[in-house]
Image (cartoon, helix red, strand yellow):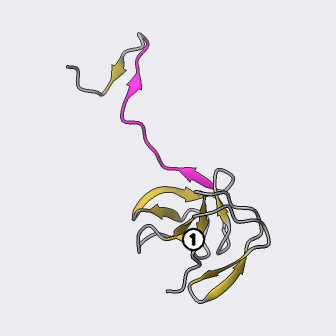
Amino acid sequence: MTLDSRLLLLSPEDNCLIAAATLEAGTSVAMEGETVVLATTIALGHKLARHALSAGEKILRYGAPIGHVTRDVAKGEHLHTHNLESDYLPTYTLDAGHAFVGQNES
């Protein structure tokens, strides 16, 4: 796999890459045998699509799902709150008396 040194693949199962440097719009990056020109600036540490993604597709980071895309996304496109929704489910809630429900009390 040919991958630009400014991009990180955290796990082979991931469908997102991480910017190891801020990448300005118009920058060309090598992504798995293809050169992709970035349409927008991608900040250090932000995610971009490893390949084209369909609306509803799960995003994997470290091989684990972190959310899903809310619309079709092109290869190399920035993944963030404008096109990515978290699948996080809280494991506790606050009751009316502001006590945590669902956690072990010690």
User: Would you say the magenta stretch is mainly helix, strand or loop?
Assistant: loop
Residue 7: horizontal and vertical position, in percent? 57, 71
Residue at horizontal 56 percent and vertical 85 percent from the top: 32
| Residue 89 part of the magenta segment | yes
Check disc 1 and report the residue beneath it: 7
Left or right of 11 in this view: 70: right
Tell me the crowding category of disc 1: few under 14, some 14 to 19, or many 20 or more residues within 10 angstroms, Cα based. many
Question: For residue 16, which quarter of the picture?
Answer: bottom right
Question: Does 101 sit above or below residue 27?
Answer: above
Left or right of 76 in this view: 16: left
Question: Does 103 sit above or below residue 89?
Answer: above
Q: Amino acid at mark 1?
A: Leu
Residue at horizontal 42 percent and vertical 36 percent from the top: 90
Residue 18: horizontal and vertical position, in percent? 55, 64
Viewer-proximal residue among 4 and 101: 4
Q: How many marks?
A: 1
Question: For residue 40, which quarter of the picture?
Answer: bottom right
The region drawn magenta spans: 84-96
Question: Does 96 sit above or below residue 44?
Answer: above
Q: Residue furthest bottom?
A: 33
Q: Residue furthest left?
A: 106
Residue at horizontal 36 percent and vertical 35 percent from the top: 91
Query: Is disc 1 placed on a helix, strand or loop?
Result: strand
Residue 25: horizontal and vertical position, in percent? 78, 67
Residue at horizontal 63 percent and vertical 63 percent from the top: 21
| Residue 88 part of the magenta segment | yes
Viewer-proximal residue among 77 and 21: 21
Which quadrant holds the C terminus?
top left
Residue 50: horizontal and vertical position, in percent? 57, 73
